[in-house]
Image: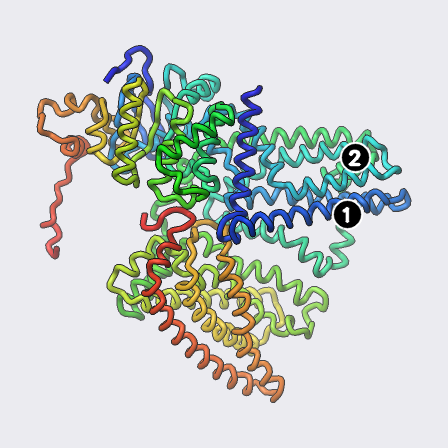
Amino acid sequence: MALMQSRGAAILWAQWRTILNFYRKPQMGGYWVGTIVMAIWYLMVALGSAGIAVLLGRVRPSDFSSFELVLTFGFLAAFLYWQVVPVFLASTGMSIDTRKLMVYPVPERELFLIEVLLRFSTGIEVMLLLTGVFAGLIRNPEIPSWAPYTIVLFVAFNLYLSAGVKDLVGRVMERRGIREVVVLGLVVLMVSPQMVAMMGLPPGVRAALVNFNQALFPWGVAAGLAMGKKLALNIPLSLIYLGVAIWFGRWQFHKGLHYDRDAARAKSGHGGTTSGANWSLWLFQWPRRLFQDPLAALVEKEMQSLARSSRFRLVFFMGFTFGLVVWLPLAFGRGGLNGRGPVESNFLTWISVYSVMMLGEVALFNSFGFDRTAAQLYWIAPVRIRTVLVAKNITASVYIFLELTIITIVCLVLRLPISTWKIVEAFAVTIVLAVFFTALGNLGTVYYPRAANPQNSWRSRGGSKFQLWMLLAYPVLGIPVSLAYLARYAFETQVAFYVVLAMVLCLAATFYYVAIETAEGVAIERREKILTALNQGEGPIGV
Amino acid sequence: MAIIQKVLAIETNNLRKIYGAKAAVDGLSLAVPQGCFYGFLGPNGAGKTTTIKMLMGVAQPTSGEISLLGEQINPSQPEAGLRARQKIGLVPDETLLFDNLTGPEYVEFIGRMYGLDRRMAAERAKELIEFFELSSAGRKLIAEYSKGMRKRVAMAAALIHRPQLFLMDEPFEGVDAVGARLMKDLLLDLVKAGATIFLTSHVLEVVERLCDRIAIIHEGRLVAEGTLDELRQGSESETLEDLFVRTVGEHNRSASDLSWL
């Protein structure tokens, strides 16, 4: 028993160090910045918790029915947070992977308990907020004094279930293709509260949600029990939920612990030749028909390596799905499809530029970082760095064009009010902006190179300095394009718009020319620093 | 070298591991005596890593038996497996390290996994980190370590609980000459003191110099096993490289096949 406690304490200590080290990474601003950011974050959550405690302490019986509904939705939010966040933390490396501990003399049941306790540490924010709920209910004289203690059952239910969900999602996400869809679903789930808060819910959905009887769901049961209501139903139900969560958690944890990746890969036929392989080979060989080597060889290699990178695939996929999910309700949520606001009338342009900005992170702004095992070669092989950058830019352009085409098709399929001229405009504006972004990206690639793992779907933290730079650069680069819109507004003709846009394109081309010349010089001058930067983080390069 | 004959350190009987339609390990039977420095060789994809994964308990054999230090490794007898693991030191492949811990934190953590109390684990971790010349890495995370440093920190963690048996997957990979010498001398001292070392390596010179017994696996099957002298079959001048190439199948290609070269 003492040994188990000591090992459990060691694992929790390691988890704590892992979180602390994660926040203290240089990319996160260093030791002190990381510590301060973490302290401010938890202080804010603690203040929120105190606020909840004060509010709940003052609720009167006349408000109890609406209060129970609020509590139900609050517990639903806690439930979703607790089930989703551990998956993200595991993929960012912020959570100890208990599977790695199975080679040590730790019994499986002990590992499972530790895994459950680790879920506690990955939901500290929820725990703080639930503490606030508990304190508020305890302070409320209208609620039976024993009732708030039943929140413990809801916490235990979430911890056990979360242990199982994390393992299940982790295994599902190892399957190619499914991984991108799952991450997209999780991202949408994560941003949905924010979207609901910003735009509200359509009246029909809202009514359906309010009228939908949630009393029998775990969060509804927990809310009722915490207020001391319907004990004959809520107590057995909460115990049943807890039992199911324990069973599910243990079952999935056991499966996850003994999951054999190599066997699963062999079963799903990874590494074998498929009929798609010949098709993709043909697809990736088009550059040799248009360009001379080494440019053609470089473009072919870039096309293939980007298409095989999980992170690129995810971002590309999100460009025409997540972008639509986020911007569609914002544009048309209130006013319907006939809205005349700036976002509604330029929706396609808006979403196209947004998707290019998303693609920029993986294809433009740090193009050596996603290709670091090959990066050394560029300084060794008899190829100009300029040619390498041009090859990367051509590849990015092809994917950007493909993305724009898909977005347009999706918008047309959804029957959004988009005219032919709007399609032309969206392509024209996005291409001009893409030239600016590409030029900027080449400078970013040589000035702020960062090691990245192209196979990791989720990790996307860039250098803080570079992100600050980008934050300033985006509005500045948008100014020339906005001049075209200004010209159309002033002269009330499309001709003025396209004349100015053509001039902006010339400006963008000049900027691109100057930037690539500069980038080549800087790449030669800073080659040692660039390679050192690419060597940091996720393992050595050149392996 | 003093080879203790009583209980075998590692015993596998007709061990098999099937991936899809392919047998990664096919009927492997090994008997590694205690106090032995045992080299486990094979070309790429021969089944070395799969074997060591099964020994470590990371992969479940499709069939066959494994016994470590007299304890049967079997899912139906988890207690025996735990007793065996308590006496084993692992230098696993790099994926089993905890990237977001520093070297000292990781070594101390592993010590505590083996039941050392916190103070002792911290003290030993500090000494091991100094011994393997990792102190200069300071607060660097393992994620930022070079390949050689990762191997050294894994080796440090493997030693912290004074195990009787070491399972090592390519322990010298990426380690510089000085670091490799340090590790080799240490391992030889451990064997002299009675420990058993089972290692896989592609560096045949190292295996030739260190190992008492050698096994060669090819396409999942054991194709040779014995002391170096036994394997040489009387040909004293034969190096381990010659022997290895002869055993796993000599290539019959030369530069002249590439006429343009």
Which chain is indicated by disc 1?
Answer: A
Does the image show residue A258?
no
Which quadrant is home to the C terminus of chain B?
bottom left
Viewer-side residue, A61 vs B237: B237
Q: Residue at x 37, y 71 (%)?
A: A518
| Kind of residue indicated by mark 2 | Pro
Q: Position of residue B222 (x, y in %)?
A: 25, 26
| The furthest residue to the top | B6
| The furthest residue to the bottom | A491
**SS at mark 1?**
helix
Q: Position of residue A496 (x, y in %)?
A: 55, 87
In this rendering, is residue B171 above or below A500? above
**SS at mark 2?**
helix
Residue tagged 1: A51
Which quadrant is home to the N terminus of chain B?
top left
Q: Residue at x 80, y 45 (%)?
A: A69
Q: Residue at x 67, y 42 (%)?
A: A126
Precedes in sequence: disc 2 or disc 1 = 1
Q: Residue at x 30, y 18 (%)?
A: B193
In this rendering, is residue B221 above or below A74? above
Point out which mark residue A148 bears: 2
| Kind of residue indicated by mark 1 | Gly
Viewer-side residue, A184 vs A338: A184
